[in-house]
Image (cartoon, rainbow, N blue to C red):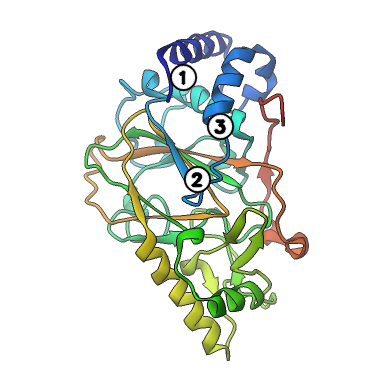
Amino acid sequence: MVDEQQKKLLRRTVSLLVDEGVTADTLHLYSHRIPRALVAALGRLTCVPQSDSGYCILKGILSEFTDAPGLTPQSWDTIDPDQTRDLDVAFAIVASVAGRIFGWKSQQDGRLVHNIVPSEAFADMQVGASSTVRLEWHTEDSYHPDRPELLMLACVRNPDEVGTDVASIRRADLSEDDIALLSTRPVLLYPDDSYAGSWSNDSQDAARMLTLWETRHGLCMRYDPPYTKLPGGQPELRAAWERLGEALDRCATTVMAEPGDVIVMNNDVAAHARRPFKARYDGTDRWLKRILVRGTWQRPEAERSEPGYAQVQVGPYPSLHAGR
């Protein structure tokens, strides 16, 4: 749990940094200004979720910064950068202790702190800005070999109590045969519709991404059904792949975040989803912040040969944690 002394230290640190003109995107240049006591305290809270659940929630860690965030923007690109600068810097500090934060050049203009809000233009699409459809199970940026190891979501506003569904591959009741198929038969994953630019999802690139793989900590997963092309002529693979989705449904839990809470997910273990909800587009809708975090985890050697659709990362910037 976050105690009041840690919150005050974080508040004081953010105030000093913002007074100097620091933003979430330039925080790495001022890492020497972050008190070691704060880094140590946050390091104990943001440790990688190694449990089979694949997630943890930091209750109220940013509550000092979410009292008056202003109106929920109607899309990620309409927000005034100064509107939540203190919150963005605080969130970036927390995330930078967990690992090395980064963004994508073609996603939300390369920003390190993303705004996840319902947008009318994306209401029925399989992206975070949707609302009228269920956002299906997925692990973040599954198409890329350098996808985040940790996904962090900070709640700014959630008046309708829209939960984040989380399901761990280590709690899914898959058969040994299905695990073997999904660990040896590759599929083709491609970027989702939140990225600027274009590419063909009928690419002639060979299917090369494995859905499951084993590590010394347990089973890991790479899964994004709406943006996956399965190879033809392998009905047994398709059946196993669909059973994975059903198994995630059965072991799922709904995490309810309140303003100031941060959900930390192990992106190799836990898939996440979201149920449909009614967006009002009146400045009072659900509003999350998102940060992607890199670590030093080992992934299958074969991933190193993947092209990643030429997507370019911004960062990652160094971790604040002294032990990393």
**Residue 319, picture quadrant:** top right
The amino acid on which the numbered mark 3 sits, given as a three-letter code, is Ala
Indicate which label's residue lies in the foreground, 2 or 1.
Answer: 2
| Label 2: few (<14), some (14–19) or many (≥20) C-alpha neighbours in 10 Å | many
Looking at the rendered structure, the secondary structure element under dot 3 is helix
Q: Is residue 220 left or right of residue 52?
A: right
* Residue holding disc 3: 95
As measured in the structure, the alpha-carbon distance from the residue carrying label 3 to the one carrying label 2 is: 12 Å
> Can residue 34 be seen at all in this image of the molecule?
no
| Label 3: few (<14), some (14–19) or many (≥20) C-alpha neighbours in 10 Å | many
Out of 146 and 18, give the one closest to the viewer. Answer: 146
Looking at the rendered structure, the secondary structure element under dot 2 is strand
* Residue holding disc 2: 265
Q: Position of residue 132 (x, y in %)?
A: 27, 58
Q: Split into 4 quadrants, where in the image is the N terminus?
A: top left
* Residue holding disc 1: 86
Q: Is residue 28 left or right of residue 55?
A: right
Q: Position of residue 23 (x, y in %)?
A: 56, 22
Q: Split into 4 quadrants, where in the image is the C terminus?
A: top right
Out of 191 and 59, give the one closest to the viewer. Answer: 59
The amino acid on which the numbered mark 2 sits, given as a three-letter code, is Met
As measured in the structure, the alpha-carbon distance from the residue carrying label 1 to the one carrying label 3 is: 14 Å
Please give the label number shown on residue 115: none
Q: Position of residue 241 (x, y in %)?
A: 50, 76
**Residue 111, picture quadrant:** top right
Q: Is residue 50 above or below residue 138?
A: above
The amino acid on which the numbered mark 1 sits, given as a three-letter code, is Asp
